[in-house]
Image (cartoon, rainbow, N blue to C red):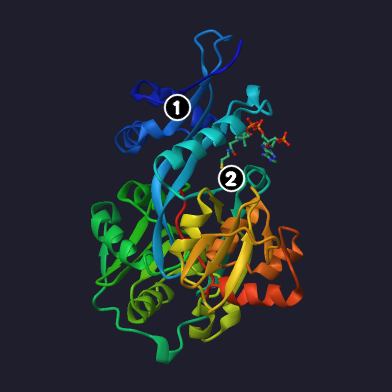
Amino acid sequence: MALIYTTATGDDVDELCEFDGRNFGFRMEADEIEWVRENFDLDRFVVARDPALDGSPMVGAAGNFGLEVTLPGPTVVPMAGVTWVSVATTHRRQGIAARMMAWLDNDARAHGEPLIGLTASEGGIYERFGYGAATVVRAVTIDSRRVELLERFRADTSSIRFVDHTEHYPEICAIFDRYRRQAVGQVSMPEFLAQENLRPHGPSSRMVCALHPEGFAVWQVNPDWNDGDPRHGLRLWMLCGLTDEAQRALWTLILSTDLAGEISSRLAVAPDGPLPYFLTNPRALKTTHIGDHLWLKVLDAKAAFSARSYRTDDALVVELPDGDKLRITVDGVSSTRRRRADLIVSESAVGPLLLGGISASVLAAGGRLEAASPAMLRRADAFFGSSPTPHCSVGF
Ligand SMILES: CC(C)(COP(=O)(O)OP(=O)(O)OC[C@H]1O[C@@H](n2cnc3c(N)ncnc32)[C@H](O)[C@@H]1OP(=O)(O)O)[C@@H](O)C(=O)NCCC(=O)NCCS
């Protein structure tokens, strides 16, 4: 019997939470199920059921959040944020995810979103669905016992307040919102996503939120008394400063936290940010992992490439996977019938090229893009590139 695919409703929420928790390996408590009920737009979720089984249980689920992403300009464009994609272990590799991903594309188009993006549980899943890794994550550790900020970078911490972050989401989200609109690669963080991104992980629930008038940092403390030589672990979930002064004040505070040993962060430190230059010993900051973070798929290339700015006064013809050709200039984007394109782009390269963090040269070397000549590749690097490297510090 064929599976049944339907838009989710309120009646699906309990089963959806149980199903998702089972597939991702966690249990959702009653308050988290309530969080789903209150915040998810269930019209944007699809569920698959198997009528051949008793009670027609859920065997697949996936959804979109209505988010925004910042492109070079900087300019903010709507982006569907894919989330909660999972398929029952008993029903894997039968095309259920593929069918749901197509449903999500259609849902995004119906909402007028030119882009659809996600953060992936595994690296090997999403390229076949047209997504390309468009931002890089740099996980770091800092041995706070070996390092401090150089004197000239230290900033006054007296305006920072320690607060319970769960009572200050509106301020945190307002600061982040101002920040992300100026920062290429950043995705919007509505309050319900802040609750998810700033949730403590593991046994310790001691979270610390340092709120500056123009920034905030949230970290989790994992105590380690180490037989009288304390080295508590500080897991930095997010650090956001609207000004250099706020950034430096927050780092001054974190690096002078008593009893701290290792500070670790997955998303709070930008891949090419200046932090190492601020430190008395830059080698105390170690990069422990570099990998993909935000995967992007472009659903409406003309709208997406029209929205962003470009770094050189050039005009390039790009052939898209469907054969359409766009002439992209600093002044606008138009369809063209020119026979030969300057660049031919595979589907998974369109998102990274759009965001500008992965160069055309790297995409070409990786077999995802072809250029008419080496000189054209250099022009494309200069034209599409974005600096600093796009960074996304939100998960969804
Ligand atoms: C990832 C997951 C959703 C895939 O569901 P599925 O229904 O088995 O996927 P499909 O049958 O539609 O597979 C479509 C294609 O993707 C491939 N694929 C699926 N999962 C893959 C994986 N984890 N790694 C690499 N390729 C994968 C399939 O082989 C298939 O390839 P083909 O088109 O060449 O035949 C499912 O394995 C799952 O629920 N995993 C646990 C939760 C999870 O990680 N979700 C993703 C969250 S970001």
> In the picture, which quadrant includes the N terminus?
top right
Instruction: Tell me residue 31's x, y (percent).
Output: 32, 35
Mark 2 and mark 1 lie on one chain; the one further toward the N terminus is 1
Instruction: Tell me residue 190's x, y (percent).
Output: 33, 51
Q: Is mark 2 within 8 Å of ligand 1?
A: yes
Left/right placement of residue 58 relative to residue 370 reads left
Image quadrant in which you'd find residue 154 = bottom left
Label 2 sits on a secondary structure element that is loop
Instruction: Tell me residue 320's x, y (percent).
Output: 63, 54
Q: Is residue 250 above or below residue 118?
A: below
100 or 319, nearer to the observer: 319
Q: Please state which amino acid type lies under the numbered disc 2.
A: Ser
Tell me the tag on residue 121.
Answer: 2
Tell me the tag on residue 26.
Answer: none
- Kindly identify the residue that appears in the image at 52 percent across and 86 percent down: 280
- Kindly identify the residue that appears in the image at 32 percent across and 61 percent down: 177
58 or 34, nearer to the observer: 58
Answer whether residue 276 is visible to the viewer in this image: yes
Instruction: Tell me residue 295's x, y (percent).
Output: 56, 53
**To which residue does mark 1 refer?**
16
Q: Is residue 345 above or below residue 9?
A: below
Q: Please state which amino acid type lies under the numbered disc 1.
A: Leu
